[in-house]
Image (cartoon, rainbow, N blue to C red):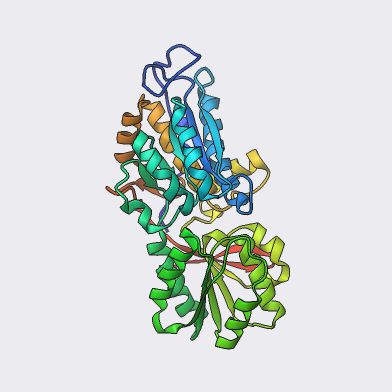
Amino acid sequence: MRSLIKFGAPVLAAALVITGCGTKGSSTASGSNKCGLKIGFFGALTGDAANLGINIKNGADLAIKQYNDKHSSCKVTLVPFDSQGDPSQAPALAQKAVSDKSVIGIVGPAFSGESKAADPIFAKAGLTTITPSATNPTLSQQGWKTFFRMLGNDATQGPAAAKYIQDVVKAKKVFVVDDSSEYGKGLADIVRKSLGSQVVGNDSVQQKQTDFSATVTKIAASNADAMFYGGYYAEAAIMVKQLRQQGWKGTFVAADGVKDDGFIKAAGAAAEGAVVTCPCLPPDKAPDFQSAFKAAYNSDPATYSAEGYDSANVFLAAIGAGKTSLSDVNAFVKSYDAQGVTKHIKFDDKGEPSAVSVWAYKVTGGKIVPDQEIK
């Protein structure tokens, strides 16, 4: 595991020093006035996958609160753009974000589907985005100069999940299901390819589906001793509950879209023993961040809270360095090279992070707990 730094590190908001704030009041992202600037959060704050978006927003909000504590005369504001995780809403929200000339960067979009819909608009406007959670590999292959990703994509998570199924679960027969979304199907297809002949069956379901009896019947008939689900926690909880009710004894494996307490609350005892992979760091690997987050929100940081915190801090570092025009912010992020909470942050020419890790988590005693880093 890479060593992690404490809150005194230069990348963190508390250590940033802003110069030449200028006058307070109305400002733009033109660089003529450094005060009154905004960072946007783009993702689900309501809807079936809201918990994942709220986790990220809280991480970004903590970074900005810490920054503002040190720069009370020249504060930065976090502006939420609630997509509900719906790609069809993303273009209008993106247009709204780019029309606000005081927004100098976007933490998000949170999900892959909405990223595919919104990122062309951000790229055209020159508004830089850092996603803490959208993992579809193709997002960095579109030529968007404004796209950056704070975590490993599914080209790393998919093979890691397959490796865990093979080496730790030791499954011989695996059934793979996806939710037909940009994220879920993309990830499941990578797992299918990685597992090869071990895959004894496939199926696709839909988001907001509640009756999985046809899929459950297929899984039982396949004699699979493990299954992989590419999708989000709302449907995963119903599916695993119905699987257990029908007597299926295999190992339920899913990925980061299922790593949320909402999965356990909805699935109940059926969630016990489920495995969830995630290219995200366990909270106890960043204890100072964990304690600050808990003090602010009376709960431990959850999935992608730390990545949201790191993403916001990159933009705050740009502001602290006096880089407030959209082009200057983009150039600053491209050349960023500093330690963060989750990793040493540096991006390649496609916006992918140079440091990547994937962890397996397991539902044990009604909680999602770290199991091991998948090497």
Residue at the image position 45 percent from the left and 25 percent from the top? 102
Residue extending farthest to the top is 23
Residue 252 in the image: x percent, y percent? Answer: 58, 74
Image position of 334 (left or right of 36): left
Q: Quadrant of the N terminus?
A: bottom left
- Picture residue at 30% right of the left edge, 49% below the top: 350
Q: Give coordinates of residue 373: x percent, y percent.
A: 46, 65
**Residue 89 image position (x, y, % from top left):** 53, 44
Left or right: 284 with respect to 242? left
Quadrant of the rendered image containing residue 127: top left
Quadrant where the image shows the C terminus: bottom left
Q: Is residue 241 left or right of residue 104?
A: right
Whether residue 12 is visible, yes or no, is no
Question: In the rendered view, would you say 201 is above or below 334?
Answer: below
Q: Nearer the viewer, residue 115 or 263?
A: 115
Dividing the picture into quadrants, the one containing residue 324 is top left
Residue ID at (38%, 31%): 318
Q: Nearer the viewer, residue 95 or 245?
A: 95
Residue 291 higher or lower than 10, as above or below: below
- Asked if residue 267 shows in the view, the reply is yes
User: Please, is residue 69 above or below residue 299 in the view?
Assistant: above
Total residue callouts: 0
Q: Residue at x 65, y 58 (%)?
A: 261
